[in-house]
Amino acid sequence: QVQLVESGGGSVQPGGSLKLSCAASGIVFNRYDMAWYRQAPGKQREWVGAITAGGTADYPGSVKGRFTISRDNAKNTAYLQMNSLTPEETAVYYCKARSWRGHEYWGQGTQVTVSS
């Protein structure tokens, strides 16, 4: 049974930082690309970055330079470090695992609230 469990969400003031974790089980983690998405109320789910199985990360322009994705294959965990957060980035953050065969799995999400 595949499980992705996000953690680390919470409330933070504008300009603050949070680090999210995505712990995977039931997959051969080092064979999966990992991605992070977010979805704000009333908006479409938005891609915020990804890291390949080989460790190469990529980001959209909106978060480049502020967000960092990393992975620890020994711990079957991916991370999303978020800095300089703005209120507009309040959303539920999700992680996704994708194999080279195209199998995809999603976590349940973790809430991030940026507010003063």
Image: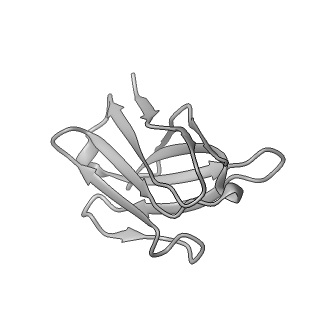
The residue at the far front in this view is: 116
In this rendering, position of residue 29 left or right of residue 51: left
Can you give x and y, in whole percent of width and height, for residue 13 in the image? 58, 50
What residue is drawn where x is 40% and y is 28%? Answer: 2
The residue at the far top in this view is: 1
Q: Is residue 33 above or below residue 27?
A: below
Depth check, front residue: 23 or 90: 90
What residue is drawn where x is 20% and y is 46%? Answer: 73
Depth check, front residue: 26 or 102: 26
Depth check, front residue: 51 or 104: 51
Q: How many marks?
A: 0
What residue is drawn where x is 84% and y is 47%? Answer: 42
For the rendered model, the colour scheme is: one colour
- Viewport quadrant of the N terminus: top left
What residue is drawn where x is 73% and y is 48%? Answer: 40
Image quadrant assignment for residue 27: top left
Can you give x and y, in whole percent of width and height, for residue 101 in the image? 41, 52
Q: Is residue 30 above or below residue 111?
A: below
In this rendering, position of residue 32 left or right of residue 98: left
Can you give x and y, in whole percent of width and height, for residue 98 in the image? 43, 50
Depth check, front residue: 101 or 38: 38
